[in-house]
Amino acid sequence: MKFLLGLFLLLLAACSDSESSAPSSSGKDLEGFILMPAPKDGVILGTDSEKAQPMDRPQMKVMLNYDFHIAQHEVTCQDFADYPDVLPNLSCEGNHVITGITYYDAVLLSNAKSKAEKRDTVYSYSKIVRDQEGYCVNLVGFRFNPEAEGYRLPTEAEWVYAFSVHYDSKQINEDFTFFAKEWVNDWLGRFRDTTVTNYVGAPNGGSFDEHVVKGGNFSAGTPVIDLYSRGDIYVVSASSRAQYIGFRLAIGKIPSAVWLDNDGVAVHNSQSILLTQPEVRAATGSYQVKLVYRDNVSENLVYVDFNNGKPTLVEVDDSLNNFHPDISPDGQWVVFSTGMEGVTGESQVFATRFGSSAISVKLNVENAALPRFRVTAEGDTVVVYVTDGGDNSAEGNFLAQSTWQVPFSKGVFGTPEKLFDGAYHGGVRRDNQFAVTGARLLRSRVGDKHLVWYDSAQACNVSLSQDGSNRTLFLDFGGKPGREFAGTKYGVHEQILIADSTGKLIQMIPAPEGYSFDHTEWVKGAHLIVASLTNPSGNHEKVVLINTADSSITDFVGGDDLYHPCMWIENGLGNLDIDDSLDPDSAGLYLGSKFLQEDIFWRYKMELLWKYRDSADVAVVGSSRAVDGVRPRIMDSSGFVLNLAQIPNSIFTTRDFVKNYVLPHLNKLKYLVVSLDIDFWWKGDDEGDNFFIQSYKEYPGFVYDENHNYWRDGYPKGLYELTNLAPGVANGSSQYLKEYGFTGQSCVDWGEEPPAIATDTTNVQDSILLERSFEALQEMVEFARQKDVIVIGAIFPQSPAYKNTGAYGRHGVRRSLASHMIARLKSFESSNFVLLDENKMGEHDYSSNMFENYDHLCFGGAKRFSNRLDSLIASLE
């Protein structure tokens, strides 16, 4: 953590215009806070400028119909020291603005301050997850209550309103000091060209757990600040820690808060995931887990893919009634009905892609209810449904209904086929000789016989296991057969009952104290049951997983009223041919717990490395400039090219990655392309800048590899397959894998604006650090020489306007030192090392519309750079 004391004191000592037209804070009742009356004309978020980042567009108007208070100054180190449990390892040397803390750290401080003043806490959670340094990187079960009167972070709209009224970047303002970029309360979502009242961001941060940060910082002098920018150079996750990001507090209820999802739909935000991905694997035996259920408040289906980055809740509004959803055997589709169990009447069945907001596909029959996927004895995927799912206590009415199946393939229903009379919606065995149901009575069909089980006592929520055991689970109303089996009385739905294939009770599982069960379903092919837990008020408060082996119960999702859960688990390990010595709880698990952008990069770069270890002729390593600047698919002359570059990066990280992974395992490698980011060469070979010194320890896969000497004695069979099955990002994986590691960016013409200088590195250590970085390059070249691999040092172009500054590029260093180093790199050329300098101290031929920002190429620039790199490699053949 770094504190910029001198600049902070300067800010505190400076004067502001006493004639400001800002709302007076003289009437405020909170010391150190400014009262912000509701703005009459609203607040403008975002911009319509085509030069802005996509996340900042389009312009959106927000009306705020409430007053709030916002802190005059950003939170300091002493503020955290006053609450030592928030950051247990923090050491303060003076009262400085604090930076380098996560969004979750800010949340914990807000709650601690609220508790100390006996206010309501705005944020709730079930568990704190900290990194090795004690910073909070996740709050499991996190929920934000906008109606609570406690300390919190300001929303983006509140921040923009306060900043526009109280701050002028042309002069220092003591009434509203501004020192660092600031966390705000909002998750990052898309804007819409509309007006929203009391907007509070997106419902969640998506797979990257992205969060909004606002403003600039003084690390490079006077900041460049605008009101519409919402992010940073890289993706900002809620667990990110940057030396220039701090926050300030706000207080005030937000009535009728509105969240907007990425489709521009206002969603109900009263739910949260209650466990981590390792806990998902512990409970299910797999990372490949999906869940769907009905939010009975919003009346929408909610989807969770636990293998997708940081799992999030995706709520889809398709305007249809949706009950009893069921997930297809391949995990890609969901069927549901508009009618529900126990209710007689019209009902239709629809199918939709898992998590999609696309129009659902309708089964074109007169009446269909309570659909379930199954695989027939012939291996075909079908949907079983009944003509009515109502009260089955009268046998005549029950047998007047029927059970059907319809083929389902690639989102298309086939021709329905009647199976038999009777509405057996609890499950049908593959050979059609056994079926169960329950909507008052527990009925079964064994061969051609229709039977009533459980001594005709009331039963419901019936489900037939799909593991071949023919076990039937159900709920009852404290009936006599259940009481006799349990040896005690119990209330309605307070026990899960399990019967064998003859209807005889063989097991009962009690609900947790204070709860009852509802909507119980077997998880296909497993000894697990998914269910809703109902509290004494009758609300379905949780979705849980029950393990029949030990009767343990694991909380998965919490909310206000959660109905009809269905869980899908793909236990691919059982079908894999892997080395018996590999531990699937660690091997191939290269996704870190913080869900930062670099975590996702590592996960997919390692999958590419293991998958193509016997194919790659060229490997690209280095920073985000190489990630965005080298496109393997268009390098036709170079053979098979892998882009293994990573963010954030230092040449020391690159060196150790090359030494431990690239050169030992890419068996056909001929060329190693290394991005030479000289303006990063002020970084050191220490735990702050070299991933392989400390940070890697939070990634089980890297620790496992290290403990096995990085597999230098031989690649273990199945390591790629385990990496492939590990958690990732569903929406981003095709991009990473299809383009062999290249992540192309859209082009933004930044025109004549002065370039940003993010880091001031004009200090006496420049030459020493440059030398250490050069030595790291020398080591890589020597490693490569021993493997008969040629190293190409690639310098990527940056804005030519840096010629008019004292800095070589976005992150320093002094131009005189950079020029000297480039000359040294040229003199270092040999049969084993070639320099490709496409920056030429700013005298290059890349136009501004070939860039994504001041120092990263977009698609157009990547094409030019990749073609030139391809030509260079061809000339070396």
Image (cartoon, grey):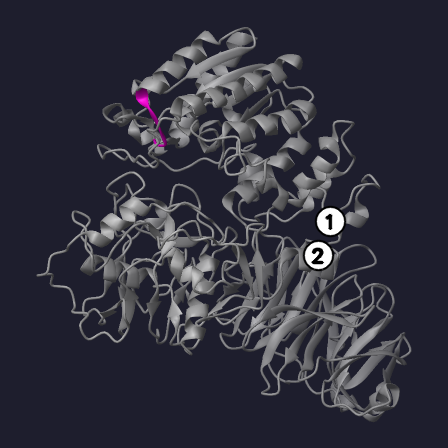
Amino acid carrying label 1: it is: Asp
What kind of element bears circle 1? Answer: loop
Q: CA distance from mark 2 to mark 1?
A: 8 Å
Residue 528 - label:
none
Q: Can residue 353 be seen here?
A: no
In-image side of 863 versus 384 (left or right): left
Instruction: Give the magenta part as a residue range.
Output: 810-815
Residue 784: where, in percent of width, then height? 61, 16
Q: In the image, is residue 719 above or below residue 451?
A: above
x and y percent of residue 605 in the render?
59, 35
- Image coordinates of residue 35 in percent, x first then y, are 23, 70
- State whether residue 626 is above or below residue 49: above
**Can see residue 35?**
yes
Q: Position of residue 384 (x, y in %)?
A: 72, 68
Circle 2 packing at 10 Å, graded few (<14), some (14-19), many (20+), is some
Q: Which corner quadrant of the image does residue 825 belong to? A: top left
In the rendered picture of this protein, how many numbered marks are placed on residues?
2
In this view, the residue in front, 236 or 45, is 236
Q: Is residue 845 left or right of residue 877?
A: left
Look at the picture and state if 703 lies above or below 542. Answer: above
